[in-house]
Amino acid sequence: MIYDVIIIGSGPSGMYAGLIIQKGTPVQSVPEDFKVKIIDAGSSPGGLTKYGFIQISKSWAFHGRNLIGSLYKEGLEAGIEYSFNEKVCEIIKRDDLFYVTTDKQEYFSKFVIVATGIMPFPDILANPDKTNVGSHTPREMAKEFKTDYGWNNVLVVGNSEKSINNLKECLKTYFNEVEIFLLDKDNSMNLTTFGIPSKLYESYDGVIFDYNSYKLKNGTTYFLENLSLDMINGYIITNYFGETSISNLYASGTVTTPTSGVMAAIYSAQIVALDIGRKLCKETKADPSGRFPFFPREFTWDGSYQEGLKRLSIYKKS
């Protein structure tokens, strides 16, 4: 089957992008007839977001699982297909189609959105008493992991050697034993023990995945290495609308910037999805005028403010 859009990653960015493509404007109730598929390596939708508590402001906060559950339900109702426990291995573009190869099968699509975030293993927090994400200061990490889970011997894991060594030195004050394990693209496919050799994984009370390590070097984009794609430290470079240096290949959310967060991911997804939506179908069922009011209705982008930004000196290379 040839899909209109394949989205890799089912976090807030990936699922929201699918909704906007399939339903046009956010208020449209009638889905389009596009074939949209979302592929995720995790066992369920949401990535790390489903485990977190999201605080936008002091009085506006919610559990990540509530957001993910709502997006997933609406996506199913809109006719979006989902595949879980499926790892994307390679993407190749031939003529006007993308060949997306996973560890289970091969798919074909007109457009692809990479929305994989930065952490290569979506289910790290499924068993927090054994594997957890070190996203706080070393002191707070030690306080949480020693008090809540009784860890004394820990393994620090990441894909930036300098960062995990730094964290190791900071944590040695608090734990009996701290060692490191450097992940790379060759062992990142093992989902059972998160790329760590089984014997090593079992020999420690707990495993801390150094979040800062992945902020420095994205860990989810190894399957793009065969493409001539503009990237920096694993982060994908896009234009103003989320399109990469390869036509019809888009990226949204944290995979494009070290700045993370649900709001940033959703904003990025909306821009990407509306741009793809215009290319698939300028008129929607609910609004024949186009994807108004979010994007201009002209047939080209020459009159939009985004194109005007390119002509400003602050965006020109020195």
Image (tube, rainbow, N blue to C red):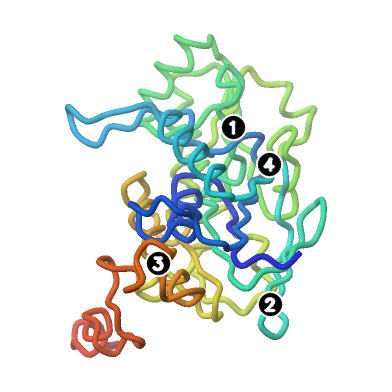
Which of the pair 280/229 is nearer the observer?
Answer: 280
Q: How many marks?
A: 4
- Could you tell me how far apart the alpha carbons at marks 1 and 4 are, in whole angstroms? 15 Å
The circle drawn on residue 97 is 2
Q: Which quadrant of the figure contains the C terminus?
A: bottom left
**Residue 294 higher or lower than 191, as above or below:** below
Lower sequence index among marks 2 and 1: 2
- Residue 222: give x, y in percent of width and height: 65, 60
- State whether residue 70 appears in this view: yes
Find disc 1 in the rendering and name its residue.
124
- For the residue labelled by badge 1, is the local secondary structure a helix, a strand or a loop? helix
Which of the pair 138/257 is nearer the observer?
Answer: 257
Q: Residues within 10 Å of mark 3 (few under 14, many from 20)?
A: many
Marks 2 & 1, CB-CB < 8 Å contact: no
Q: Amino acid at mark 4?
A: Phe
- For the residue labelled by badge 3, is the local secondary structure a helix, a strand or a loop? helix
- For the residue labelled by badge 2, is the local secondary structure a helix, a strand or a loop? strand
Horizontal arrangement in the rendering, residue 16 relative to residue 225 (left or right): left
